[in-house]
Each structure stands twice: as structure tokens, then as C-alpha cells.
Image: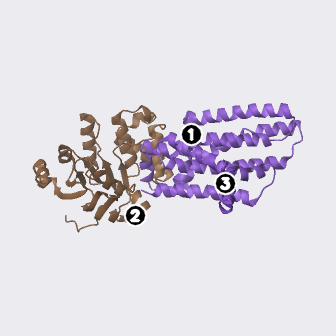
Amino acid sequence: MTDGDEPPAILAEAVSKRYGAFTAVERLDLHVRRGEVFCLLGPNGSGKTTFLRMLAGYLAPSAGRLLVAGHDVVRDGLAAKTKIGYVPESVPLYSHMRIGEFLRFMARLRRVPAAQVAAAVRRVAELLALTDVLRKPIRALSRGYRQRTALAQALVHDPEILILDEPTNGLDPRQIMETRALIRSLSGRHTVLMSSHILSEVEKTADRAALLLDGRLLGVRALADTPDLEAWFLSVT
Amino acid sequence: MNTLVILFRKELNAAFVSPIAYTVAAVFLLVLGYTFSLTLFSTKVANLNYIFHQMYVLSVLLVPVLTMRAFAEERRTDTLELLLTAPVRELSIVLAKFLATLVLVLGMFAGSLAYAVVLGLYGDPDWGPIYSGYLALALHASLLVSIGLLMSSLTENQVVAAALSLGTFLMLWFSDSVAYLLPPSFASLAVNLSLIGHFKPMVSGSVFLSDAGYFVSACLLALFLTTRKLAER
């Protein structure tokens, strides 16, 4: 399949984000295909989170054009937001709620019809093994369950595109393997755009990866064509 | 509209699981009950004028405590990122927080209706100033809540938000006091900005459109600025 066969899930054209004199993302061009797992790879401070936040509609680009499922995130922001599920790196949750209550709230907020909310919550609870803890208060959750709950809220409206900022951050090895397996299982049905600064993580999860450094895109590679990711990383940085 | 209702319910639930709302309401009603009993037994006059002024002062002191968390806490815990990346308009988020906090404050005020009932049962009060007094309090509360939300949207520190709100309320309260120090054009502005200057006539039964207009327009301005602040990112 070539890039021209169907409209991309995500299209960035010369996207920049500036804070005064500081440029967090500089003229970034990116094309993410539908159904693939795409990873933004780069060290801390390379602009990954800023770019993901622009895609999710939390930050506005200073320049350039950013399309999500064909919707411009600036001009048609609400429509773009209905197409995405987003898990920020800090895994924010409402600690005064119970898991089920939180998922129902997020489902309603993400425009799941009222009659389908219960089924949507059941579906994601089963997918993320949360069924037995739906009545548990969020404030009492371990890091692993917090991450699962955050993933569940991002999937509850069955979005076309899933945006995950450092999804395995702070998880133990078993939870990391489970999260990787989950992300792989979502590919095809969902487009997954994730960020990571861990090479082995990218190798085991992504179909393609883009390397960012100081807000600039250094290259994009298909993982199948890149047997030695570390060598590629070292050659371009 | 639907989103506004969903967010409003979430805000109201959040308020009732926090001890802040209960503590503020308890302090408010305790002080008010004490003042009412004291005033009634010492003056033996069947009006609520003194109580309304007491409620004015208490709301200036206590509303910052109710509004300080609104945006500051959402920023601190990053949950604002969840809200702003959902298909929700910034205006809905602001209005939901505004309405939920206003319902809390008006609920506290409603506790004082018991005093009006007592006066009605055992005296012969002039009901006009009581009705206009409650109207004044509702408008006053709307303005305080909207300014409190604006201050909360400026910081992620709750204490800073509360201090900014309280400072703004006090400046508005006493703005007419500095009028005599200012040139005539600025003096007029300072007098017209005064919270108490627009509150007093209504509490004594004189309802002027200019007073109601002050509260409504200043409230709308604060809500507009809060929405702009939220959209600025």
C-alpha cells in the first residue's frame, strides 16, 4: 500500500509550535497511515509531547496544518476531537470518582449516545480487565490500574485514532508487556500514534517510527526495514 | 446543552464529595444563625437588612474558598487536559463550573429563608426589601463566583487563586472609598465599580436597573475572560 491509496489518519504539514523565542516543534511534516502503530521516538524534550498535544487539540499550532481523520484540528477542532482517544503522559484521572463512574462520564463527554454508554463501558472494561474493579475508587488504584483506566477512557467511544504519550511509563515489566500486546491488538481497527524514548519499546510495538530531536523530524523508518534501530538512531543523531 | 448538563453534574458531585463545601456551609450558617438571633433579640425589629449585609460579608470571605479549586485543581492534576481534548467547548466547561458553584452558594443562602419564615410567623415584616434583598444576594453571588473562577483559571495554586479572588473582592468593595482622592472622571468610575454601592439600594428595597446591570455585566465579563483564558493555549 502506498501513502496515496487512502487519506491518511494523521497529516502534519510544516507544523510548528513556538513559545516566545523557544521553538518546541519546527516545521514538522508527518503522514500516519490508517490502522498502523506509529511511534514518535526521541529523547526527553525533543517535542514529542508538544506534537501529541497539538494533535489532541490541547495546544494550538503556531504555524502549519494538522489534520486528524481529515479534520483540521484548528478550524474543525470539535469534529477532530470526536475521532481521537488520548492518554496524556501524566495519566490524569478524577480521583473522587469510581472507575465505572469515570468511564461513564468520559463516554458521555465523548458523545457516546446515552443508550449505548453502559455497553461501551462494559466493552472497554472487558478489554482492559477492569470489570471486577469498576466500583473501586480511582484514588485507591495502583499505577497499573490507573494506566488501564486511562486507556479505557480513551477507547470508550471507539475512536479512529488513539494517541498515547509514553504509555508504558512507570509500569512494571508485566504491565509493560500487557500494554504492548494491547497496543498491537488495537492496530488495524485503530490507528495508534504513541511516543517513547525507549528503543526496545519502539521495536516491539510500532510498524513505523519517526525520530525527533530538538523539535525537528530527523527521519521516518518502517521497523520491518530497520533491523538495527539503535544503529539508525545513532546514525541520524 | 447536553455536554453542559454532563459537566454540571460532575462539578456538583465533585463539590459534595469534598469537605470544603460542607465546611463552608457550616461556618456560613453558624455565623448567620448567631447574628440573626443576636439582632432579633436586641432590636426586636422584623427585617433582614442586617442579615443580608452579614451574608454579603460572609460571601466575600467564603466564595474564594469555593472557587479556588475550580480550574487550579484541574490544572494541577492535569485533568484539564482530559476535558480540553474531549469534544467540549471551553464555554461549556466554564458555565458548568459557574452554575455548580452558584447552586452551592445559593443553597447556603437558602438556609437563611428560615429567618424570613420566623419573621413572617411572629412579626409583620415588609416583604419588598426581603425579596429585593434576596435578588441582590443572588446577583452578588453570581458576580463573586464568576470572578473567583477567573482567578482560579489564572493559576494552578489554589491558595493563590483564593488570595487573588479575595483581593479583587475587597478592592471592588472599597473602590468608592478612594474616589475622593481621584480626578472627577476616575472618581465616578471608582464609585460605579463599588460592590457595596450597588448592593445597598437593592437590600433596602430600591431596585434600579443600573445596579442589576452592574452585577450582570461584570459577571458576564468575568465569564468571558475565563473562557478566553481557557482557550488561550
- Is the C-beta separation of discs 3 and 2 under 8 Å? no
Of residues A129 and A52, the one drawn nearer to the viewer in this rendering:
A52
Of residues A145 and A89, the one drawn nearer to the viewer in this rendering:
A89
At mark 1, the secondary structure is: helix
Indicate left or right for B102 with A95 as reference. right
Is there one chain holding both mark 1 and mark 3?
Answer: yes
Q: Quadrant of residue A70?
A: bottom left
Mark drawn on residue B15:
1
Task: Tell which circle, 1 or 3, labels the residue nearer the N-terminal end.
Answer: 1
Amino acid type, callout 3: Leu
Chain ID, purple in image: B
- Is the C-beta separation of discs 2 and 1 under 8 Å? no
Q: Quadrant of residue B222?
A: bottom right
Indicate left or right for B167 with B177 as reference. left
The reply to whether residue B67 is visible in this rendering is: yes
At mark 2, the secondary structure is: loop
Chain A is which colour? brown
Q: Which residue is mark 2?
A: A74
Q: Whole-Å distance between the Cαs marked 3 and 2?
A: 48 Å
Amino acid type, callout 1: Ala
Of residues A224 and A114, the one drawn nearer to the viewer in this rendering:
A224
